[in-house]
Image (cartoon, rainbow, N blue to C red):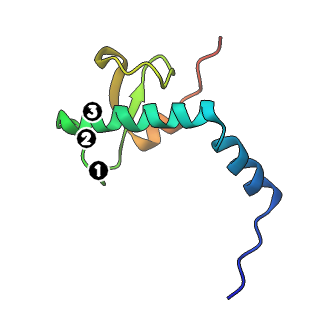
Amino acid sequence: MPMPYKGDRAKAQERYNSKPEQVKRRASRNQARAEMMKAGRVRKGDGKDVAHKNNNPKDNRKSNLAVQSKSKNRSHKLMKK
């Protein structure tokens, strides 16, 4: 079975996601969710996101984390600098 064609957009996204800075940001987001799961605030498959209040994924202080629905967390405008 032949491999499906991977378009330019998919290749560009793969290159971006594999950059060391993006890997660190993703790992920090995953760590934040794991901490919230351990605390019992979220569960696998619950439809919730762990949001960073200041939009900095590396800032995993408890005071900076909040549980939100996926739709709310992914639809808000990003903070402007």
Q: How many marks?
A: 3
Pick out the residue farthest to the left: 40
Quadrant where the N terminus sits is bottom right
Q: Amino acid at mark 1?
A: Asp
Q: Quadrant of residue 31?
A: top left
Q: Is residue 28 above or below residue 49?
A: above
Residue drawn at (24%, 39%) of the image: 37
Q: Earlier in the sequence, mark 3 or mark 1?
A: 3
Pick out the residue farthest to the bottom: 1
Quadrant where the C terminus sits is top right
Q: Position of residue 79 (x, y in %)?
A: 59, 18
Q: Are marks 1 and 2 in contact (CB under 8 Å)?
A: yes
In the picture, measured across the screen, residue 18 lies left or right of residue 7, that is: left
Q: Which residue is mark 2?
A: 42
In the picture, measured across the screen, residue 49 lies left or right of residue 10, that is: left
Instruction: Indicate which label's residue lies in the foreground, 3 or 1.
Output: 3
Query: Pointer 2: residues within 10 angstroms few (<14), some, or many (20+)?
Result: some
Q: Quadrant of residue 16?
A: top right
Q: Amino acid at mark 3?
A: Glu
Pick out the residue farthest to the top: 81
Residue drawn at (59%, 24%) of the image: 78
Q: Quadrant of residue 33?
A: top left
Q: Which residue is mark 3?
A: 35
Q: Is residue 64 above or below residue 68?
A: above
Q: Position of residue 67 (x, y in %)?
A: 32, 32
Q: In the drawing, what numbered circle is on residue 46? A: 1
Depth check: give the residue in front, 62 or 73. 62
Q: Are marks 3 and 2 in contact (CB under 8 Å)?
A: no
